[in-house]
Image (tube, rainbow, N blue to C red):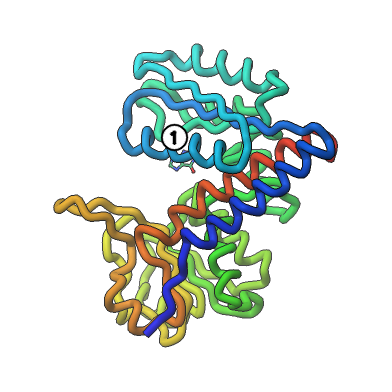
Amino acid sequence: MSQIIDGKAVSAAVKQEVAEETARLREEKGLKVGLAVVIVGNNPASRVYVNNKKKACEAVGFQSFEYALDETTTQEQLLDLIKVLNNDPKVNGILVQLPLPKHIDEKTVINAISAEKDVDAFHPVNVGKIMIGEYAFLPCTPAGVMRLIESTGTEISGKQCVVIGRSNIVGKPMAMLLLHESGTVTICHSRTKNLKEICLGADILVVAVGKANFVTGDMVKEGAVVIDVGMNRLDNGKLCGDVEFESAEKKASYITPVPGGVGPMTIAMLMKNTLTAAKQQAGL
Ligand code: GUN
């Protein structure tokens, strides 16, 4: 039987830290922190995320600037807005909610965001910094996963860490962060042979494939720490992760639930990045 990692509690602790530092910097240095969130179109899931980001900003004492743009917004118009936000001193962080409508090129948009305000850490400059371990911003979801692993008291150094998934947003940076903590890291993906065997060697298993119940208990090493980044909506409307919780829980020492595991951490780490951006821009 494993211990369930409470992502809501860890997320609340991170937001509390951010709120306290924000209040202190406002009092001592007059620093104000602002995050601009841009959403294009009416994707319902994106709408929920953006509303949650706005609420989190209020909770930690940031100003939030929301730009809800019509589905028909052109790439040029979006790039013009980003230019304005890049030059607005009240805006310390810029987040353009993905996915964008098909007629807009995500890479072009991400590249247009000032690297100093790129609180998602998606800009190539920030991605490169992650590679060499000299980063200001950590990509929010992998950073949240690191914080959850830390909350279990598990040492990463020397451990076999397996990441399933190689996306730019989660899998690749996740592997880098584990490597920086001296884990022995294996990245698995759809072409990986002997996936079960590799997973069975994992002391720390991070799953980010986007397939419901992809990892089952027979793939989990006894005593492993299992982190489930998945968020899949089943036909019956229920949310479920990439890990089959009931069977994996019998083997893991610690496991994250879905919902209530990694999900709440992403926004907490976004708040942390935004505060870091504001401090850097103020030379603090
Ligand atoms: N869409 C889903 N997750 C994310 C995220 O972390 N950042 C942005 N910008 N869009 C997303």
How many marks can you see?
Answer: 1
Report x, y in % for residue 98.
Answer: 43, 35
Above/below status of 218 relative to 50: below
Foreground residue among 14 and 120: 14
In the visual, does 104 lie left or right of 236? right
Q: Residue furthest left?
A: 236
Q: Which residue in the protein does label 1 denote?
A: 50
Report x, y in % for residue 181.
Answer: 67, 68
Above/below status of 46 relative to 108: below
Asked whether residue 169 is in view, the answer is: yes
Where on the picture, by quarter, is residue 196? Answer: bottom left
* Residue at the (63%, 66%) spot, across then down: 179
Where on the picture, by quarter, is residue 142? Answer: bottom right
Above/below status of 77 relative to 184: above
The quarter of the image holding the C terminus is top right
In the visual, does 111 lie left or right of 54? right
Q: Secondary structure at mark 1?
A: helix
Foreground residue among 7 and 215: 7
Where on the picture, by quarter, is residue 216? Answer: bottom left
Mark 1 C-beta to ligand 1 under 8 Å:
no
Label 1 crowd bin: few (<14), some (14–19), many (20+), radius 10 Å: many
Report x, y in % for residue 7.
Answer: 47, 61
* Residue at the (50%, 25%) spot, across then down: 66
* Residue at the (54%, 56%) spot, across then down: 12
In the visual, does 114 lie left or right of 165? right
Q: Residue furthest front?
A: 27
Report x, y in % for residue 271.
Answer: 60, 44
Asked whether residue 188 is in view, the answer is: no
* Residue at the (52%, 29%) spot, across then down: 37
The quarter of the image holding the N terminus is bottom left
Q: Name the residue type under label 1.
A: Val
